[in-house]
Amino acid sequence: EPEVTQTPSHQVTQMGQEVILRCVPISNHLYFYWYRQILGQKVEFLVSFYNNEISEKSEIFDDQFSVERPDGSNFTLKIRSTKLEDSAMYFCASSERAFRRETQYFGPGTRLLVL
Amino acid sequence: GENVEQHPSTLSVQEGDSAVIKCTYSDSASNYFPWYKQELGKGPQLIIDIRSNVGEKKDQRIAVTLNKTAKHFSLHITETQPEDSAVYFCAATQYNNNDMRFGAGTRLTVKP
């Protein structure tokens, strides 16, 4: 069964450094998402992406964050200058098509630790 | 915006018993309610969902009910097995909306 994959599974970085989290959505899916889950807290929506542009973003998704689909398979989340409070589990998700885009399939996540 | 509350935060049942997890939502415009199961070290996996034009949906041992008037929905797992042990999340959103709001999660433990 097709699934969303994410790399790396764990990332440790120093405060102020840039990190890029990578995702490979399910191949025929058109909508892509990033969520984060701070330890012990709810899963929070960050951003959605369709047709090579951001379609919606939350208040969390400030200028430090950016997303990109550099090729036909990868979807990346970049944090330009990491802060301690960026430490969280980051989940990528994808959904298939317009009228079912609310049905989202999640990857296994990348655990980011900012020191 | 939408706010989803989930109860209980932890639930322990004996193998074979039923488990019920309840969620409430605040935005009456929400019309899609998925449930995700998250096992240790894995991402949330969609297990069942319900749309607002349906009051109940069942898939083998899992069922979900929706009460639009009261703005709450519940997950029912019957004949629980140890492999049902996981964290379960409810969520709410609207059709063609990207911003899915999650509950805080319920850690279900099924004791053999």
Image (spheres, helix red, strand yellow):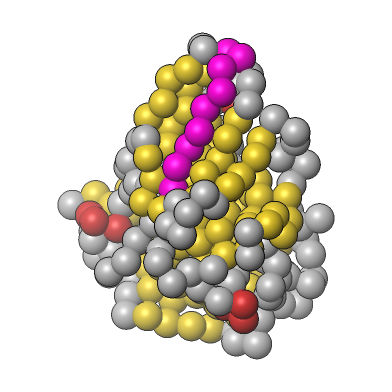
Q: Nearer the viewer, residue B69 or A47?
A: A47
Q: Where is residue A75? Give x, y as percent.
A: 50, 50
Q: Is residue B27 magenta?
A: no
Instruction: Give me the residue at 44% from left, 76% from top.
Output: B63
Instruction: Give me the residue at 54% from left, 68% from top.
Output: A30
Q: Which residue range is magenta in the image?
A: A15-23
| Above-or-below relation of B97 to A45 | below
Instruction: Give me the residue at 66% from left, 81% from top.
Output: B52
| Above-or-below relation of A110 to A4 | above
Q: Nearer the viewer, residue B47 or A102?
A: A102
Q: Residue furthest front?
A: A71
Q: Nearer the viewer, residue B15 or B2?
A: B2
Q: How many marks?
A: 0
Q: Is residue A22 magenta?
A: yes
Q: Is residue B41 left or right of residue B49?
A: left
Residue A43 can be seen in this image = no
Q: Where is residue B8? Give x, y as percent.
A: 53, 50
Q: Residue furthest bottom?
A: B53
Q: Is residue B80 left or right of residue A40?
A: left
Residue B46 can be seen in this image = yes
Q: Where is residue A26? Give x, y as percent.
A: 40, 64
Instruction: Give me the residue at 46% from left, 60% from top.
Output: A72
Q: Is residue A58 left or right of residue A3?
A: right
Q: Where is residue B107? Give x, y as percent.
A: 42, 46
Quarter where residue B100 is shown: bottom right
Q: Nearer the viewer, residue B2 or B112?
A: B2
Quarter where residue A55 is shown: bottom right
- The quadrant of the picture occupied by the N terminus of chain A is bottom left
